[in-house]
Amino acid sequence: MTNYDIFNGDADGICALLQLRLAEPREAQLVTGVKRDINLLKRVEAESGDRLTVLDISMDKNRDDLHRVLNAGAEVFYVDHHFAGEVPVSASLKSMINEAPDVCTSLLINHYLRGAYLAWGLVGTFGDNLNKTAQGMAKNLDLSAEQLLQLENLGIYINYNGYGSDIADLHFAPADLYRLAAEYANPLDFIEDGSEYFQRLETGYHQDLSSARAVQALAADSAIAVYELPDAPWARRVSGVYSNDLTNQNPDRAHAVLTAKSNGHYLVSVRAPLNNKQGASALCRQFPTGGGREAAAGINDLPADMLESFINALRQAYP
């Protein structure tokens, strides 16, 4: 029998697994990658009796492989907040799916564990840019304003670390970052003891964000704004957190950040307005390789000749 922990390489996926394994320790093979690498179940050759934990990756995007591993006799625990489509009916599948815009996988695991490792759940929720949700969770912890800000920043930095076209773009491979953090039941202890890791992420984040903020908008009005970043490691790293930054600064506007790719296409991050967190998933699913959730979604490979169509669709989605 083999155990597999399969998780998104962003803050939400990492912090969901941190909570779960602190509460339920289990030796497992880690299956993860950059944030946009979500077809993770295809990497697992499951056999009868294997146990798979799947966190923060779309069931819809992994449906065929989910059926495959269930048919092989594996048991699956699946927790996610992205568009799922029809959930398979199987005695071997236990799922917790909630697509509400103010929910993330770390929050679902926190509820499942009844707050056993709330601080890590808080980090993951901040990392997914669910700040109001995180602030509500924080009321159940005795934290100073400085400590709360530290946890918020840690979530942002872990999330930032997940973006890139491949592991080489990242400061830390997500599996390595998970292992470093897994030594600590309290993320504040990780920040203190692992200060070199925290500072490496913090420095990279601020440098990359500064570069992004210097880019002029491709299109902008009161309803939407579109930015194009170059084909460069810093741009790939910052694309998602820059989208969140824009949304937090302009809560009534929808945003799209396009990052040029070596094939001439674009990687796209879309954020619905903070004050109207809906429609991003439906928008992105109009295009090949698109998907996500109501508040935040993306397109992995938007052909350049579809750019005008995408901007028009963005305007129609958020008039």
Image (cartoon, helix red, strand yellow):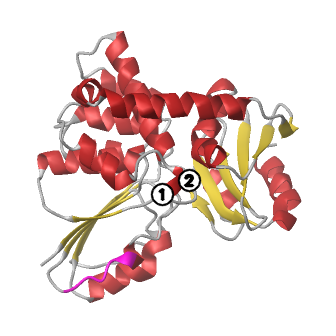
In the image: residue 114, left or right of residue 139: left
Residue at the image position 69 percent from the left and 32 percent from the top: 211
Please indicate, yes or no, whether residue 275 appears anywhere in the rendered image. Answer: no
Q: Any mark on residue 192, and which?
A: none
Circle 2 crowding by C-alpha within 10 Å: few under 14, some 14–19, many from 20: many
Give the main secondary structure, helix, strand or loop, of the magenta stretch. Answer: loop
Q: Quadrant of the C terminus?
A: top right
The residue range painted magenta reads 43-47
Would you place residue 209 above or below residue 83 in this image?
above
Q: Tell me the residue that label 1 is attached to.
A: 167
Would you place residue 208 above or below residue 83 in this image?
above
Residue 247 lies, in percent from the top left, at 65, 33
**Residue 277 position by quadrant:** top right
Please indicate, yes or no, whether residue 268 appears anywhere in the rendered image. Answer: yes
Residue 263 lies, in percent from the top left, at 74, 68
Name the foreground residue: 194 vs 256.
Answer: 194
Q: Tell me the residue that label 2 is attached to.
A: 164
Q: Quadrant of the N terminus?
A: bottom left
**Residue 251 position by quadrant:** top right
Farthest residue to the bottom: give it: 72
**Which amino acid, by three-letter code, is at mark 1?**
Ile
Residue 25 lies, in percent from the top left, at 11, 53
**Which amino acid, by three-letter code, is at mark 2?**
Gly
Is 304 one of the magenta-colored residues?
no
2 and 1 marks in contact (CB < 8 Å): yes
